[in-house]
Amino acid sequence: MEEAWSIARRRKQGQLMRRKAKIIARVRKRKLSRLADPQALKRRAQKAARAIVFKRVASGRTKGEIESKQMLISIDKKLEKHKGRINKIAKKILPKIKKQEFERLRQLKANRGK
């Protein structure tokens, strides 16, 4: 998600995701047994970096703690100005994300053996 969405766009996206929920769950279950591709790891790092910057901009609150949709939209607009910082943080935390992925797979294989 690059730009801030309006309330109508958020509602429409929510409806779409509810319709596709079962398909997404099936694909997710299949992909959980494999190592994530580099693009997926990069997306995870971007998402984590975005959450870090969001928390800074939102004075210590996460997306789930903010009730007002208008405030969420305004914070998302502010985040557009911090793209450089988000990319820099994402690049910095990418090795940590990769390590978590390898650890997740190791745990998965260990649990299968039992």
Image (tube, rainbow, N blue to C red):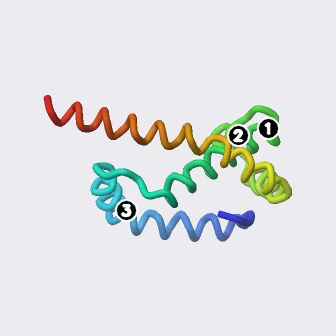
Which residue occupies the foreground of this view, 96 or 86?
A: 96
Asked if residue 72 is positioned above or below residue 112 in the image, the reply reads: below
Quadrant of res 2: bottom right
Nearer-N-terminus badge (3/1): 3
Nearer-N-terminus badge (3/2): 3
Q: Residue at x 67, y 42 (%)?
A: 92
Q: Which residue is mark 3?
A: 24
Q: Which mark is residue 52?
A: 2
Q: CA distance from mark 3 to mark 1?
A: 31 Å
Q: Residues within 10 Å of mark 3 (few under 14, many from 20)?
A: few
Q: Which residue is mark 1?
A: 56
Picture coordinates of residue 73, whole percent (x, y): 76, 57
Picture coordinates of residue 61, whole percent (x, y): 73, 35
Q: Is residue 64 left or right of residue 29?
A: right
Q: Residue at x 18, y 36 (%)?
A: 112
Q: Residues within 10 Å of mark 2 (few under 14, many from 20)?
A: some
Picture coordinates of residue 25, whole percent (x, y): 34, 57
Identity, as a three-letter code, of the amino acid under mark 2: Ile
Q: Determine whether the residue tagged by mark 3 lies in a helix, strand or loop.
A: helix
